[in-house]
Amino acid sequence: MPRKLIMAYMSKICGKPFLARLLIFLLFAICLSACGDSGTSADDRSDFNGVAGMVLDENGPVAGATVRIQGTDTFTMSDENGAFTLEDLPADTVTVSAWKDKYYAAKVEGVNRSAVGLSLYLRLYQTNDNPAYTWTPPVGENSCAACKKPITD
């Protein structure tokens, strides 16, 4: 049926155009879910023996990070969207780590088999000194030892 005819019919049934649009939307959503993609992913596979997630930093996804199961040779690289998948886990719980050049490593312990949506957050190395820092000598008149005499004696 053409859209205007459906809207007119639904308006008669519902009495209001908004309700007619809502009903059409709900019918459309039901049809999409019934006729949707039948492909499988890590999210909907009950037999998935792995870990899937994202490597992120303060600006978003990190591509090209090495993600591995600690204590094994199992590793992968995060894709251009920061996503990764590791399969065939050796145990029910594992430790997952990620690293990339110029970043501190990140790890999550106690990750369960079939975990999906794991996030590993990397933090950039500090590349500059604090300009307000002043060196305190370990000994001497202006040292930490001099100002904490009761502790250091």
Image (spheres, helix red, strand yellow):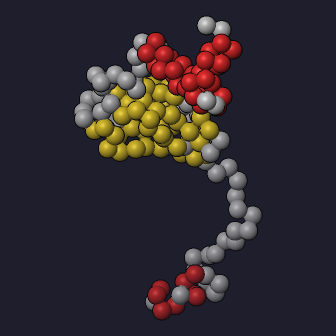
Task: Looking at this view, name the residue that lies furthest to the right.
Answer: 131
| Location of residue 95 in the rendering, given as x and y in whole percent from the top left corner | 35, 40
**Identity of the residue drawn at 50% across and 34% down:** 54
In the visual, does 152 lie left or right of 129?
left
Task: Looking at this view, name the residue that lies furthest to the left.
Answer: 91
Q: Which of the pair 57/11 is nearer the observer?
A: 11
| Location of residue 116 in the rendering, given as x and y in whole percent from the top left corner | 40, 32
Q: Which of the pair 36/70 is nearer the observer?
A: 36
In the visual, does 45 lie left or right of 123?
left
**Identity of the residue drawn at 57% across and 46% down:** 123
Q: Quadrant of residue 12?
A: top right
Q: How many marks?
A: 0
Q: Which of the pair 105/44 is nearer the observer?
A: 44
| Location of residue 98 in the rendering, given as x and y in whole percent from the top left corner | 47, 37
Q: Which of the pair 114/35 is nearer the observer?
A: 35
Q: Split into 4 quadrants, where in the image is the N terminus? A: top right
Considering only vertical position in the picture, is 121 above or below 76?
A: below
Task: Looking at this view, name the residue that lies furthest to the bottom.
Answer: 150
| Location of residue 38 in the rendering, given as x and y in whole percent from the top left corner | 42, 12
Task: Tell me, yes or no, if residue 24 can be seen here.
Answer: yes
Considering only vertical position in the picture, is 70 above or below 48?
A: below
**Identity of the residue drawn at 24% across and 33% down:** 91
**Identity of the residue drawn at 61% across and 30% down:** 15
Task: Tell me, yes or no, if residue 75 can be seen here.
Answer: no
